[in-house]
Image (cartoon, grey):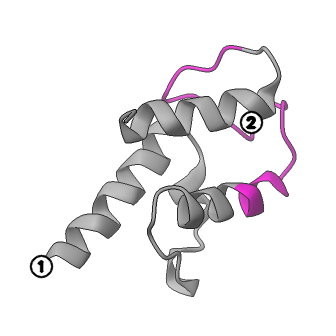
Amino acid sequence: MQDDRAAIREFVARHVKGHDLSDDQDIFASGYVSSLFVVQIVMFTENTMGVTVSEEDLDLDNFLSISRIHDFVTRKRNALAR
């Protein structure tokens, strides 16, 4: 099974269509996706990463880059493990 960061990177890559993004690059500022892409990221996070995105989590900062999405998923999983 791929690690989480690789799965997130693959998901984002499918949507930026051949443009290379670093893990820390702002997905939205790049101009390769619209702000509506955050809805797709939330669905991906819930369906593929297995974490629930609550209303309090709907802060764009959680989804700005591959690294931030990964950090968000890690935080949510750690919170569930407690």
Which residues are the magenta region?
Answer: 20-40
**Residue on which the image places disc 2:** 29
Which residue is painted at 47% across and 57% down in the image?
Answer: 49
Which residue is painted at 51% across and 58% down in the image?
Answer: 62
Could you say where residue 52 lies in the image, as x and y percent from the top left?
48, 76
Which of discs 1 and 2 lies nearer the camera? The answer is 1
Could you say where residue 46 lies in the image, as x and y percent from the top left?
55, 67
**Residue on which the image places disc 1:** 82
Q: Is residue 76 left or right of residue 29?
A: left
CA separation in Å, label 1 and label 2: 35 Å
Q: Establish if 41 lies above or below 26.
A: below
**Which secondary structure lies at badge 1?**
loop
The amino acid at mark 1 is: Arg
Q: Can residue 26 be seen in the rendering of this structure?
A: no
The amino acid at mark 2 is: Ala
**Which secondary structure lies at badge 2?**
loop
